[in-house]
Image (tube, helix red, strand yellow):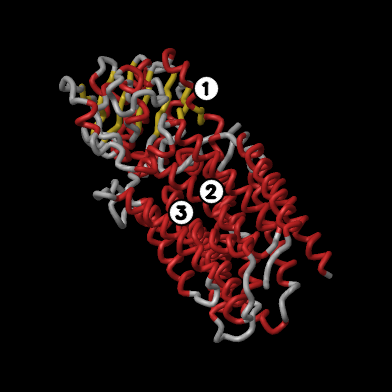
């Protein structure tokens, strides 16, 4: 019997690996997700086969409650809210690792009166610590993303020192907890420290750095599952946890690279707060405005258009009307594509999901490196709700906080139209030189409303 | 004394190292278009703690903290797993290539 269960776990691990592999190709991705879900089902059934019949009802009730909540939220969530949804689920995963590790520890030390060996003990401490940190960290990210708390950076004096002291305290408490296993108080203190540290480490990180934070928390939730695997001596947890941990770390690296910042720089927080001092205000930028009619005419006469979407497009929910714009242009034989910056939006790939939702073909969504040379031969670039990722200061101004960050070369196009609510600054808190360029026109107003007007102008032409 | 042997630890560490390496290899090749589904899909996989949750719920007696921690863990892990897979499927359904 036991060997059958082990074989089932092995099959589950293989299915996870195949599933993740398939998730990497657009045409297979959906099936890949199903393969991975099948792996999960195998793992669950193999586990249920081990439990006493009398516990089955309890387990079933929990699974039904969890599935109902999961299915309801997954079905209801808007695609623009995907980052906070992932953050929320991530947090639940972290908390699950914490409670499972704590449950096992409690059973051994308090109920059965055993001493736990150093390997299991250390793993349990890590599970609890990483799981707790993941939980509150994800909850803060969730609240920041859906605007329940300020998305800005919250800094106070001595913040980093407090975090460091808490980390040291966690280690000390963990060691004491191991040495005095009949005193569960140490473990409760450890949980408290982990929860507090999760809040304190995410709160200084501003909204536009969320792609990094979410990737990192994703990685943590994998690591927490992994350490829980050590506690339970269970390979399938270790394999899956390691896969997720690795995936989160890679995405974190990609995001940091796309912002030309180190992970440490992101985690310390406060980006953009002091930018106006560091960057200098420079000469006043005078911009040229454009009306919807003129904008429509520019679209009409262009032969190639590249749209640069940013988080502002998600906020304005403008993706559907942009699809209509693309249809109008394609009807005229205009080459219409999208340039996607890796950190556009609030999580990796955020823009792609929104545009896919709006029924835009994914082969029209081009990565930065592939499309950057094409801007120079493009008639019209339409920037919707993006700012820092098209700021030429990243190339030209060594004093700028975003200097060195890879950007989309929108400024090289013949004409640039920027759809923007107002002259507000981007996340980095600096003026965008592009707006003052001769080839740049500002289309002020809510993106959804103005683009709708442009589309109706085009329809009449 | 409840413990695992050093031999088992070494095997578990082997598994950890190889799986991490495999993860790095696999995910490095994922195109940016799929980063959000990849993240929510891998997030669902991290709900594998559901296995631990089921085992922890197996402890008898509602007076034990172990049982209640297991119940909380199982519910949360189930939300993570079911919600994660469902939302990933919903997203991937939308990724279409028009002729």
Q: Could you tell me how far apart the alpha carbons at marks 2 and 3 are, in whole angstroms?
A: 12 Å
Please, what secondary structure does the residue beneath circle 3 have? helix
Q: Position of residue A127 (x, y in %)?
A: 55, 60
Q: Which residue is identified by label 1?
A: A370
Q: Residues within 10 Å of mark 3 (few under 14, many from 20)?
A: many
Residue nearest the viewer, comparing B12 with B49: B12
User: Which numbered disc flags the more N-terminal residue, 1 or 3?
Assistant: 3
- The reply to whether discs 1 and 2 touch (Cβ–Cβ < 8 Å) is no
Q: Answer yes or no: are tags 2 and 3 on the same subunit.
A: yes
Task: Determine whether, in the image, residue A224 is placed left or right of residue A386.
Answer: right
User: Which numbered disc flags the more N-terminal residue, 2 or 3?
Assistant: 3
Q: Quadrant of residue A326?
A: top left
Looking at the image, which residue is at 23% across and 25% down?
Answer: A290
Q: Which residue is identified by label 2?
A: A219
Give the numbered dot on residue B43.
none
Q: Chain of mark 1?
A: A
User: Which numbered disc flags the more N-terminal residue, 1 or 2?
Assistant: 2
Q: In front: mark 1 or mark 2?
A: 2
Looking at the image, which residue is at 26% across and 17% down?
Answer: A437
């Amino acid at each position: 019997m036991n060997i059958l269960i082990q074989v089932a776990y092995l099959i589950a691990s293989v299915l996870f690996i195949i599933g993740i592999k398939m998730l990497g190709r657009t045409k297979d991705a959906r099936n890949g997700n199903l393969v991975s879900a099948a792996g999960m089902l195998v793992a669950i059934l193999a586990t249920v086969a081990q439990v006493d019949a009398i516990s089955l009802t309890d387990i079933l009730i929990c699974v039904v409650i969890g599935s109902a909540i999961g299915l309801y939220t997954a079905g209801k969530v808007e695609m623009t809210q995907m980052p906070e949804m992932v953050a929320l689920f991530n947090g639940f995963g972290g908390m699950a690792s914490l409670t499972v590790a704590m449950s096992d520890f409690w059973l051994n030390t308090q109920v059965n009166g055993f001493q736990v060996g150093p390997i299991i003990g250390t793993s349990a401490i890590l599970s609890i610590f990483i799981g707790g940190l993941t939980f509150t960290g994800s909850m803060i990210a969730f609240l920041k993303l859906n605007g329940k708390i300020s998305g800005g950076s919250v800094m106070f004096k001595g913040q980093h020192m407090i975090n460091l002291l808490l980390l040291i305290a966690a280690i000390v408490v963990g060691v004491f907890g191991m040495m005095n296993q009949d005193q569960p108080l140490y473990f409760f203190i450890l949980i408290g420290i982990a929860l507090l540290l999760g809040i304190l480490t995410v709160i200084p990180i501003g909204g536009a750095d969320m792609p990094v934070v979410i990737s990192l928390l994703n990685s943590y939730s994998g690591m927490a599952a992994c350490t829980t695997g050590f506690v339970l001596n269970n390979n399938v947890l270790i394999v899956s946890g390691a896969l997720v941990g690795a995936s989160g770390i890679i995405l974190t690296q990609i995001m940091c690279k796309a912002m030309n910042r180190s992970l440490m720089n992101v985690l310390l927080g406060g980006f953009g707060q002091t930018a106006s001092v560091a960057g200098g205000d420079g000469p006043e930028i005078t911009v040229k405005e454009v009306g919807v009619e003129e904008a429509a005419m520019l679209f009409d006469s262009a032969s190639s258009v590249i749209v640069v979407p940013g988080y502002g497009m998600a906020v304005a929910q403008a993706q559907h009307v942009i699809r209509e714009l693309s249809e109008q242009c394609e009807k005229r034989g205009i080459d219409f594509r999208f340039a996607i910056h890796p950190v556009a939006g609030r999580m990796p790939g955020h823009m792609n999901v929104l545009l896919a939702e709006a029924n835009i073909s994914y082969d029209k969504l081009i990565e930065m490196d592939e499309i950057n040379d094409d801007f120079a031969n493009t008639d019209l670039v339409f920037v919707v709700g993006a700012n820092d990722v098209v700021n030429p200061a990243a190339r030209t101004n060594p004093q700028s906080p975003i200097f060195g960050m890879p950007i989309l070369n929108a400024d090289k196009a013949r004409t640039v139209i920027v759809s923007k609510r107002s002259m507000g600054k981007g996340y980095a808190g600096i003026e965008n030189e592009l707006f003052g360029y001769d080839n740049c026109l500002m289309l002020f107003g809510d993106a959804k409303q103005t683009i709708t007007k442009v589309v109706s102008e085009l329809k009449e032409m | 004394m409840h413990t695992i042997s050093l031999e088992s630890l070494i095997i578990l560490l082997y598994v950890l190292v190889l799986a991490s390496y495999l993860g790095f290899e696999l995910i490095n090749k994922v195109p940016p278009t799929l980063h959000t589904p990849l993240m929510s899909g891998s997030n669902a996989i991290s709900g594998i703690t559901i296995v631990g949750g089921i085992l922890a719920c197996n402890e008898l007696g509602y007076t034990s903290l172990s049982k209640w921690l297991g119940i909380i863990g199982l519910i949360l892990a189930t939300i993570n797993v079911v919600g994660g897979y469902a939302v990933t499927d919903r997203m991937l359904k939308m990724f279409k290539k028009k002729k």
